Amino acid sequence: MTSATEVFQPLQADDPPSVAGYRLAARLGAGGMGRVYLSHTQGGRPVAIKVVRPELAEDPEFRRRFRREVEAARRVRGAYTAELIDAEADGTPPWLATLYVPGPSLSEAVARRGPLPVPAVLWLVAGVAEALQVIHDAGIVHRDLKPSNVLLAADGPRVIDFGISLASGTTAATATGSAIGTPQYMAPEQAEAGEVTTATDVFALGQTGAFAALGEPLYGSGPSVSVLFRIVHSAPDLSRLPEELRPLIARCLAADPQERATPAEIVAWCRRHLPGDADDGPAVWREVAGPEVSVPAPVPNPTALNTFPLVWAPPQQPQPQQRRPRGRRTALIAAAAVTAGALLVTGVVWAVKGAADLRDGQASKSTQGTPSASVSASASGSGSASAGSAAAGSTPQSSAPASASPQPPKPPTPVPYPGLNLEEYNSIGIQEPVLRATRTGDVRLKCDKLSCELESDSSLITMLRSKPGATLDTCVKALQHADAKSAPLSLAAQGSEFCVKHPSGDIGLIVLQIKQAAPLDTGRKWLTVDLTVWRAA
């Protein structure tokens, strides 16, 4: 990723402006299932919207698989996955929305800089293995794990498209039938259209790690049939890999699925073999992920034009055969002028009388707000308008001008603060400055030996249990009966949301992105959160 223009492409003429209420800000790319767009939730969180291709949407069998896989993917919430937050399998067309990950794919990073150093490969494999643990615990087999489905965020890898690949029906022809997946990253049993299990994903993880270290697929390229033949009938050539990685990749690529390492074993192995100085890891990873680009702002909703009732409209010019005699028209104008003058005099008399009553201290309640006074004021204004109209030679409407109704107050504008790192030494302020280097802010991270929580001295905090994508109204309702100034993090995962009410009336929405100890268990506790604030809500 080198610039925003390479990541965010402008919408084309055949792109919709919105999908199911999500305003589209840019095009992110296209794949076998459909196109992917950048959008935002109502709270300002960036999301990736994948819209299914029309030809797939017309297939009832596809919709059935898509619906089943979307429901399964909703259960996946982990630090190294891009969480599914919304979807509509029965939409026209079907679509789904996941949290947007600001980072290149592994395939893009390798194409840009070449093979990754060994520490970065270990970090990558450990993160993807942890993601597979969460995915498998939800009863899902990814089936299409590959470098383009691993995104490199600044704080670690993210696995995308878990479980969705089955719905797309993407196939690769084999000598024995057809199989779902990408040929260079298939397991032998998958290539032969056999039983696909969690061990199949481990084989793909080994190939993905080898690609990161080599800069090219381990089993080479070429026609799909040739690649799949080598996977099924040949042992992988690991001699080109760095020596430190060979035992790990060999365990992942065992021909027998029962002999392959589990994701938990892979995570433990990577942690044991990473360099002793854990502080070097983040620096190496940031160099691999590259600089982050600025995400385009949310697209504002179209604003309706305010219209006001007209007091009067110029009369249509009569046709020649309908013209009245000049004398009659002059008489009408004179009558209008006399009427306007009488109304004006009446208004002045009422105004003088009211002033005299006030001066003498004898004004009564009835004369201060009677209908007569309002009528007089209205008549006075009408008389002036009528006189002007008569002077211009136009006939005003007989109705009195309508008073403009007060406009409802505009809702507060959400102000997003994405990617805030909250640790045990700093804090977050709901009011500016938001990220503070000391513990003086409104929300802090507090941990003991067993658990962590968000705490505040003055602001109310409550964790939402509803569907992700909270809005200002969601937080206002959730905070109505809240009385706690802390919220435990024991049940929180990526995407969990917390509403905060500041004493000033400002409302904050905290969305958890990362919750864990520092990578490789250094013992340092930290969070990465997105904050949205509605001022004076």
Image (tube, helix red, strand yellow):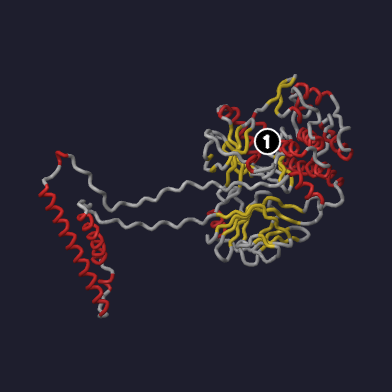
Q: Relative to 385, is 211 on the left or the right?
A: right
Q: Residue at x 45, y 58 (%)?
A: 409
**Residue 521 on image: x %, y %:** 81, 52
Direction bottom: furthest residue: 360
- Residue in the foreground of this view, choosing between 338 and 119: 338
Above or below residue 306? Residue 352 is: below
**Residue 346 on image: x %, y %:** 19, 66
- Residue in the foreground of this view, choosing between 360 and 160: 360
Q: Residue at x 60, y 29 (%)?
A: 62
Above or below residue 493? Residue 482 is: below
| Secondary structure category for the residue under label 1 | loop
Q: Residues within 10 Å of mark 1 (few under 14, many from 20)?
A: many
On-image quarter of the N terminus: top right
- Residue in the foreground of this view, choosing between 245 and 467: 245
Among the 4 quarters of the image, the one containing residue 404: bottom left
Q: Relative to 180, is 449 on the left or the right?
A: right
Above or below residue 421? Residue 352 is: below
Q: Amino acid type of disc 1? A: Gly
Mark 1 — residue?
Answer: 163
Q: Which residue is drawn at 67% across and 44% down?
A: 101
